[in-house]
């Protein structure tokens, strides 16, 4: 099949979609997140995703929000992997632990880039934050929406959000419907404008982690992963937190990665402390303790879920996993 007859879909979500804010409970960690750390090898995936997609033009918008501005989504929390060969909704969220939203909506447009054989090879998402003239009495750290995905063959798909590499989306055979089990904080956009170097993001070697000791049920907590000796040309790669209940006790498996700017930067030979912000799924079971494992390493800490929230614990690596 040639490129002109290739499978290529562009879907525009009508209007701005999503809730008017995600109630993630109290957030008490206002510290900013720096770019991320020194590298180790990571798994499959690539940010080199080829030529730009065909432009099918803007989609129609339903009546409702009248003020929408481009805004890159920050987090995708869902049931990944997603089922192959059927349409599905990809959750996306705008916000963070120290942000405040009330009455906003998320809009999303989806485009697929074809590979040499005409089948989808990678995904482009264009997201925006939409304002409505609403009165509301709350302040929420996230505003949630979805991107309507077409049926995709099984595989791994590099995803760009508003032109910047964000994360890899995994699609497999099977029924993966259910509650939110994985959250991915997207890779940061390169502030120098060059984008990341091609290739696979790599795991960092974490020196310390910090997170709440206890959280309310339904809260998307934040785990901060610290590297004490990063380089000035590093970028924060995607960070994924997955709920793992296959063992004796439930575990939050954190995968934190880094990449490097493609700009030619002359970095001094000094260490820089950098932090990665990783988002915990908001579906943890009440009255349950979750051990935290980062890139296969235990830090001897856990997060308690229930009717009380408070405290912060920070710890260095103790046990190889």
Image (spheres, rainbow, N blue to C red):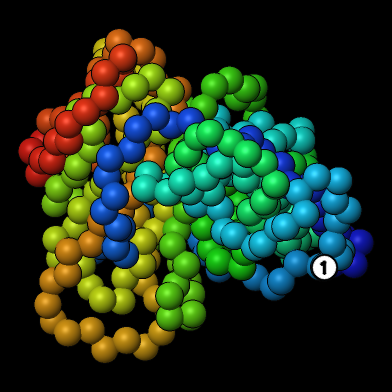
How far across and how far down the image is residue 131, in percent? 67, 51
- In this rendering, the answer to whether 178 lies above or below 229 is above
Q: Quadrant of residue 231?
A: bottom left
- In this rendering, the answer to whether 106 lies above or below 56 is above
- Given residues 19 and 288, the one toward you in this image is 19
At horizontal 12% and vertical 31% (from top left) the residue drawn is 300
At horizontal 75% and vertical 61% (from top left) the residue drawn is 114
At horizontal 47% and vertical 67% (from top left) the residue drawn is 189
Q: How many marks?
A: 1
Left or right of 252, for residue 21: right
Q: Can you identify the residue that label 1 sits on?
A: 55
How far across and how far down the image is residue 196, in percent? 45, 72
- In this rendering, the answer to whether 246 lies above or below 164 is above
Direction right: furthest residue: 5
Q: Secondary structure at mark 1?
A: loop
How far across and how far down the image is residue 85, in percent? 75, 35
- In this rendering, the answer to whether 110 lies above or below 267 is above
What quarter of the picture does the C terminus occupy?
A: top left
- Given residues 139 and 305, the one toward you in this image is 139
How far across and how far down the image is residue 186, in percent? 47, 53
Dot 1: few (<14), some (14–19), or many (≥20) neighbours within 10 Å? few
What quarter of the picture does the N terminus occupy?
A: bottom right
Left or right of 274, for residue 58: right
Left or right of 110, for residue 27: left
Asked if one can make out residue 123 in the rendered structure from this viewpoint, the answer is no
At horizontal 43% and vertical 80% (from top left) the residue drawn is 192
Q: Quadrant of residue 248?
A: top left
Left or right of 47, for residue 17: right
């Amino acid at each position: 099949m040639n490129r002109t007859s290739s499978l290529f879909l562009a879907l525009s979500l009508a209007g701005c979609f999503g809730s008017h804010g995600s109630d993630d409970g109290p957030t008490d960690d206002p510290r900013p997140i720096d770019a991320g750390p020194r590298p180790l090898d990571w798994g499959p995936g690539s940010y080199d995703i080829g030529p730009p997609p065909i432009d099918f033009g803007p989609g129609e918008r339903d009546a409702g929000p009248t003020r929408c501005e481009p805004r890159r989504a920050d987090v995708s929390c869902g049931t990944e992997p997603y089922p192959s060969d059927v349409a599905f909704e990809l959750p996306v969220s705008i916000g963070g632990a120290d942000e405040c939203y009330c009455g906003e909506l998320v809009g999303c447009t989806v485009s697929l880039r074809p590979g040499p054989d005409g089948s989808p090879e990678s995904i482009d998402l264009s997201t925006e934050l939409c304002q409505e003239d609403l009165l509301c009495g709350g302040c929420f750290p996230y505003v949630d929406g979805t991107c309507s995905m077409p049926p995709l063959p099984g595989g791994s798909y590099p995803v760009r959000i508003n032109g910047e590499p964000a994360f890899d989306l995994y699609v497999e055979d099977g029924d993966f419907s259910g509650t939110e089990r994985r959250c991915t904080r997207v890779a940061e956009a390169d502030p120098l404008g060059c984008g990341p170097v091609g290739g696979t993001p790599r795991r960092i070697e974490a020196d310390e982690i910090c997170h709440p000791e206890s959280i309310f049920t339904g809260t998307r907590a934040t785990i901060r992963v610290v590297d004490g000796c990063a380089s000035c040309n590093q970028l924060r790669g995607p960070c994924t937190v997955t709920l793992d209940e296959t063992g004796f006790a439930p575990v939050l498996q954190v995968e934190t990665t880094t990449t490097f700017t493609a700009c030619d930067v002359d970095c001094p030979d000094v260490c820089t402390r950098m932090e990665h912000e990783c988002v915990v799924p908001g579906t943890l079971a009440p009255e349950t303790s979750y051990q935290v494992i980062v890139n296969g390493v235990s830090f001897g800490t856990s997060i308690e879920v229930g009717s009380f929230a408070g405290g912060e614990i920070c710890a260095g690596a103790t046990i190889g996993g």
